[in-house]
Image: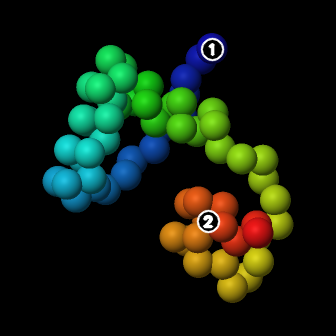
């Protein structure tokens, strides 16, 4: 599989550390962890206009 797309994300030091620790605990790189997270995203559905981003992260708006 050719990987030609890049994502540049700004993280706080705490967010970066949390990502690194999670990846280390799984024995994978941070890039691999993020790719696995993307693979496990739920199917695309219509998102209500009043949806809160924090709700979207956990899918609670679908209840």
Name the residue at the top extreme. 1
Q: Give residue 29's position: percent from left, percent from top.
A: 34, 23
Which quadrant of the figure has residue 45? bottom right
Quarter of the image for the C terminus: give it: bottom right
Q: Earlier in the sequence, mark 1 or mark 2?
A: 1
| Residue at which label 1 appears | 1
Quarter of the image for the N terminus: give it: top right
- Give the answer, above or below, for where 48 lies relative to 60: below
Tag 1 secondary structure: loop
Q: Residue at x 55, y 23 (%)?
A: 3
Dot 2 alpha-carbon crowd within 10 angstroms: few under 14, some 14 to 19, many 20 or more: few
Q: Give residue 34's position: percent from left, percent from top.
A: 46, 36
Tag 2 secondary structure: helix
Q: Residue at x 58, y 39 (%)?
A: 38
Q: Residue at x 52, y 70 (%)?
A: 54
Which quadrant of the figure has residue 50? bottom right
Q: Give residue 52's position: percent from left, percent from top.
A: 59, 78
Dot 1 alpha-carbon crowd within 10 angstroms: few under 14, some 14 to 19, many 20 or more: few
The image's colour scheme reads rainbow
| Residue at which label 2 appears | 56
Numbered tag placed on residue 41 in the rendering: none
């Amino acid at each position: 599989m050719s990987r030609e797309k890049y994502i540049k994300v700004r993280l706080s030091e705490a967010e970066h550390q949390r990502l690194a620790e999670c990846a280390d605990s799984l024995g994978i790189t941070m890039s691999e962890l993020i790719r696995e997270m993307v693979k496990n995203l739920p199917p695309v559905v219509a998102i209500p206009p009043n949806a809160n981003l924090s709700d979207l992260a956990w899918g609670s708006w679908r209840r």
